[in-house]
């Protein structure tokens, strides 16, 4: 299949090549849908799959961010504020919000912010694929990314779940007519995109990689927000997809940055970022994330027992980490930044 796809279009627009991109697009999507399918088939599996996702992917994907920020002196100096002051600011705001309103406010913010964060990451990746294929970011390019997620989050809000991820949540009041209007926009956008895709196929100019990526985007957001009724089960599909996608994206960035050569100025990061060291790279990140989060959880348990506080300290700490991660990503991954374009091979 990879050979056929390689030969079929001069504007295929692969990030690295058929083998990597098919793993990145199709492999991750199938894993995410499989994870969701398991808990839908047997809801008792949710806690186990939840823990595995958090340990193997969630914590790992947060630590992956710090390979961009702290694994070499240049990156640390460039992003010093994001590493030192911003975490303290976020933690203070999260603590104050929880103390004033209760734990539900953190869950509610997370519900909507993670939706935006996941959508924006997908938009950023779609832009990279567009540039690789020489496509313009026109109205259709934006609609096909945003329309379905907007329909999805409005649908979840209309469902008005009382809990999300085992904690209380309050959603925005959304009327049925707004959900219906969003669904119409999404369906028309998908129909328009399918027509354009078919036209490109007939003309022999189909951007294969970008097309496959858009298909995966539509499947994941459609399954995660619309096809699966349970909000927790649907979230699992989205978060597995997002975490895997992020981990591979950061590895690709670091690998491209050092161009398969050890850099004397960044010996550790450049060495583990080589193509032949991919298992080492993932193992290092996994060990760091396991140790860091184990220490954090132990410290939080001790603090809860020592202070006998009624504040949900675990929720405060973990959501502060999430929100800090969202803010950092919004800064360091903008495609218009020259280093980002260069290390994704889209500087032209």
Image (cartoon, rainbow, N blue to C red):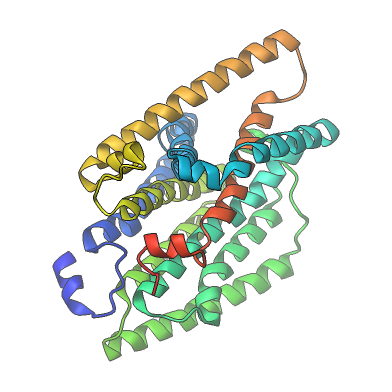
Q: In the visual, does 65 lie left or right of 103?
A: left
Front one among 209 and 279: 279
**Residue drawn at the location 59% of the way across and 39% of the way down:** 83
Left or right position of 120 against 291: right
Is residue 168 something that shows in the picture? Answer: no
Q: Residue furthest bottom?
A: 203
In this rendered view, identify the residue nearer to me: 316 or 45: 316
Asked where in the image residue 164 lies, by quadrant, the reply is top right
Question: Residue at the spot x=79%, y=37% of the render?
Answer: 97
Q: Is residue 116 visible?
A: yes
| Vertical relation: 33 (above or below) 215 | above
- Dividing the picture into quadrants, the one containing residue 286 is top left
Q: Where is 177 relative to 84, above or below?
A: below
Q: Position of residue 1 (x, y in %)?
A: 17, 66
Q: Is residue 346 left or right of residue 223?
A: left
Q: How far across and how far down the image is residue 208, in percent? A: 30, 73
In percent of width and height, residue 187 lies at 54, 75
- Report the residue that reaches farthest toward the front: 264
Answer with the quarter of the image where residue 95 lies. Answer: top right
> At x 32% / y 55%, what residue is drawn?
256
Quadrant assignment for the C terminus: bottom left
């Amino acid at each position: 299949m990879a050979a056929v796809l390689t030969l079929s279009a001069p504007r295929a627009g692969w990030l690295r090549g058929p083998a990597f991109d098919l793993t990145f697009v199709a492999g991750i999507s199938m894993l995410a849908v499989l994870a969701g399918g398991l808990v839908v088939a047997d809801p008792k599996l949710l806690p186990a799959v939840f823990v595995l996702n958090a340990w193997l992917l969630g914590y790992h994907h947060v630590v992956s961010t710090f390979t961009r920020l702290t694994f070499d002196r240049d990156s640390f100096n460039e992003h010093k504020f994001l590493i030192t002051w911003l975490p303290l600011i976020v933690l203070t705001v999260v603590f104050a919000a929880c103390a004033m309103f209760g734990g539900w406010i953190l869950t509610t913010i997370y519900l909507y912010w993670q939706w935006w964060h996941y959508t924006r990451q997908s938009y950023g990746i779609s832009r990279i694929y567009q540039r690789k294929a020489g496509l313009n970011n026109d109205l259709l390019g934006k609609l096909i990314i945003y329309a379905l997620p907007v329909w999805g989050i409005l649908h979840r809000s209309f469902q008005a779940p009382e809990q999300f991820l085992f904690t209380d949540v309050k959603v925005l009041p959304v009327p049925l007519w707004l959900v219906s209007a969003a669904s119409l926009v999404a369906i028309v956008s998908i129909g328009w995109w399918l027509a354009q895709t078919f036209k490109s196929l007939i003309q022999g100019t189909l951007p294969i990689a970008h097309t496959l990526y858009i298909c995966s985007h539509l499947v994941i957001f459609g399954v995660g927000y619309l096809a699966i009724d349970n909000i927790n089960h649907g979230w699992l599909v989205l978060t597995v997809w997002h975490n895997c996608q992020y981990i591979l994206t950061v590895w690709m960035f670091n690998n491209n940055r050092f161009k398969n050569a050890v850099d004397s100025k960044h010996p550790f990061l450049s060495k583990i970022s080589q193509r032949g060291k991919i298992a080492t790279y993932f193992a290092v990140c996994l060990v760091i994330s396991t140790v860091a989060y184990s220490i954090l959880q132990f410290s939080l348990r001790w603090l809860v027992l020592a202070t006998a506080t009624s504040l949900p300290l675990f929720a405060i700490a973990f959501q502060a980490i999430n929100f800090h991660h969202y803010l950092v990503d919004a800064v360091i991954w903008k495609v218009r930044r020259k280093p980002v374009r260069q290390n994704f091979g889209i500087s032209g």
